[in-house]
Image: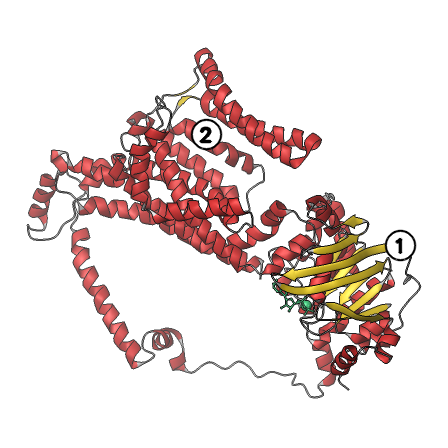
Amino acid sequence: MSDIVTERDIDRSHMTVSDEVAIQIDQMNKWYGTFHVLRDINLTVYRGERIVICGPSGSGKSTLIRCINRLEEHQAGSIVVDGTELSSDLKNIDKIRSEVGMCFQHFNLFPHLTILENCTLAPIWVRKTPKKEAEEIAMHFLQKVKIPEQADKYPGQLSGGQQQRVAIARSLCMKPRIMLFDEPTSALDPEMIKEVLDTMIELAEEGMTMLCVTHEMGFAQAVANRVIFMDQGQIVEQNEPKEFFNNPQSDRTKLFLSQILGH
Amino acid sequence: MSDTHAQTVSYVRDTMLPQAEPPLRDKGAVKWMRENLFSSWLNAILTVLSLFVVYWIVSHLYPWFANSVWRAGSLTECREIRDATVGSDAPSACFAVIADRWQQLLFGFYPKEYYWRPVLALVVFLVSLWPVLFDNAPRKMLFFTLAAPFIMFALLWGGPIWGPLFVALGFVLGYFAYELVNKSAGPLAATLAAIILPLLYWFYLVGPLAGLFSSVAPIGFEYVDSKDFGGFTLSVVIGVAGIVLSLPLGILLALGRSSDLFLINKVSVGFIEIIRGVPLIVWLFTASLLLNYFLPPGTNFDLMLRVIIMVTLFSAAYIAEVVRGGLAALPKGQYEAADALGLDYWKAMRLIILPQALKISIPGIVNTFIGLFKDTTLVVFIGLLDPIGLTNAIRASTDWNGVYWELFVFIGLMFFIFCFSMGRYSLYLEKKLQREHR
Ligand SMILES: Nc1ncnc2c1ncn2[C@@H]1O[C@H](COP(=O)(O)OP(=O)(O)O)[C@@H](O)[C@H]1O
Ligand SMILES: [Mg+2]
């Protein structure tokens, strides 16, 4: 667990939660074949929320956030993102995907394209942004994640932490209204975790709506306004960070926290 | 990193020792031989053995080449010259047959006065390859590449230029149909329009239009019939057409086979398995004999065109499997990242998946191309005069009755040059892509 993130003062002036609903999940169920992986998920995310999702491995955290941009299909219940219901209608899916950014555990940068091309690809081909403008936007976000000087390199030439920051910049270039993170720091060496978390904190400071699957409890305490604990495909408990860590309700949460905090 | 190091390490040597010469036995040729030829007893034995094999082969072949006769009118004359110079029991190649018949081996029965046309077509082809194979070409060259197939057709077969010209215009028509319909009715309708309009145009308008223009203005080269094509001209035309057409078809089949859509998947699998499961020679016989039954009576469908179609389908099935291997080798994350960014299927394939999958598949693809090119020699069995077929024709003349090896050496050498350059290009491309995407 990294305490590093708490060392720095966090600017909370833009971290405001509005009462506008960003994501509404009702009675959502999902199966992999016959395996019931998500059960009766109900979750309302308001614009500006920073939610951290944690839970033991295999509890369905990834599946849940992958359902939100339809990388996985749910079989029952409803998911409404930005007022658009996720159905098999391809138009809706493309619309939602271009408004919801996602960062993966293994970055998934495109190795055959330069950093700059990675960042301009979707704006040019999905948003039809002119190339010049797309490159300006890309450089702007690469500046934000502090690697503008790497723009002409290929992903394979960057360190893991740098790659993950590029992946974040790549998502941001689509100007998403919601960002999903699936264990963005789990594949990183400890000294690189901080640089990625710092980037995510800056994003939170700008008021981005974020759902992060992560076990970085320092990050959760610093910026999350809500922590969700999942186990066996269900949301077991959710609370604001202070309460969640100091006063967990269910036994499963207590067990999990004692394991992850290591004392 | 390094400057923190400099601050934390308190003792750093700042004057370096000069470089010392390595010991004498570790230098130059002696070192190389010790390391590469005689590094152990087993290696030493193998080295000696290989040297012996090389010596044995060269000692047998060398006299045959060294005593070869290049100027003679017939095989008997060759033998007489040999007897007079090196004696009747010395081996001697009679390359005079190549000197006498090389034009036929290269051009078949293509009219002599038009030999420049296939040669020019080859030049057009090589120039059109430039922007495809190397990325230092100006972008405008791509237009020339697009026009090249029609230019080559007009050069090789001749006839009024209106035919190929109006066929080519069909593609332009398709392009504009797509652009126009896409604006008003979306990409699906546009794709349909871009397929249907040109098809209608090709079926109903091209014939009359070309006929009309040809009667008014009969511009173009003298017509040369397919049956006059032969030798390497034939091999290269079939090989190149097969290669150029089978790559896109193979890619589509690979995508079909990896698709989730039931029907498309099963059709692709069926096609690939059936085509692959039957020898090429059978398909060639099908092309030459059976295809006529399926075509409406009266259509005189050029045999060479039929062969090209068969060869294309055959190698497309192999390409499909090679490309599928490349697709399967990509991590799932690449598909997910493309999806998550909102790219639709075709864009994801074109921009993300295929560039990487094809890069992985380059050795396999080039391997298939080399195989296809050599397999063009099989057309001899359905009566086309490829280089092998021409050797029979050449031997049929009394002058050269009994000449085998000299012809085959020449043909082998020609094929080797083509195939070896393809292999070299593949290596170059692999190395280049490796450098770029490090
Ligand atoms: N594509 C899949 N097919 C079948 N089962 C899967 C698939 N993906 C995940 N699972 C299973 O679903 C469960 C939840 O997975 P996941 O959402 O990845 O958990 P987490 O991210 O919380 O570790 C696990 O038991 C996993 O084995
Ligand atoms: Mg996971």
**Residue corresponding to mark 2:** B151
Residue with the mark numbered 1: A20
Name the amino acid type tagged 1. Glu
Residue A187 as seen in the image, left or right of residue B303: right
Relative horizontal placement of residue B414, taking residue A116 as reference (left or right) = left
The answer to whether A39 is drawn above or below residue B326 in the figure is below
Q: Is residue A214 above or below residue B340?
A: below
Q: Quadrant of ligand 2?
A: bottom right
Residue furthest to the right in view is A13
Residue B34: where, in percent of width, then height?
Answer: 34, 77
> Considering only vertical position in the picture, is A235 above or below B41?
above
How far apart, in angstroms, are the residues tagged by discs 1 and 2? 63 Å
Q: Is residue B369 visible?
A: no
Q: Quadrant of residue A209?
A: bottom right
Question: Is B168 on the left-hand or right-hand side of A134?
Answer: left
> Could you tell me if residue A40 is visible in this image?
yes
Locate residue B106, reporting x and y percent.
Answer: 29, 37
In this view of the protein, which residue sits in the foreground, B241 or B115? B241
Q: Quadrant of the C terminus of chain A?
A: bottom right
Q: Residue at x 74, y 59 (%)?
A: A28
Locate the N terminus of chain A by quadrant: bottom right
Q: Identify the residue shown where x is 29% and y is 48%.
A: B413
Q: Tell me the quarter of the picture where residue A205 sits.
A: bottom right
Q: Residue at 71% of width from left, 77% of height from top?
A: A190
Q: Residue furthest top?
A: B216
Q: Amino acid at mark 2?
A: Ile
Residue B351 position, x and y percent, is 61, 49
B391 or B362, which lies in front?
A: B362
Q: Disc 2 sits on a residue from what chain?
A: B
Q: For this view, does A206 lie left or right of residue B109?
A: right
Q: Are marks 1 and 2 on the same chain?
A: no
Q: Secondary structure at mark 2?
A: helix
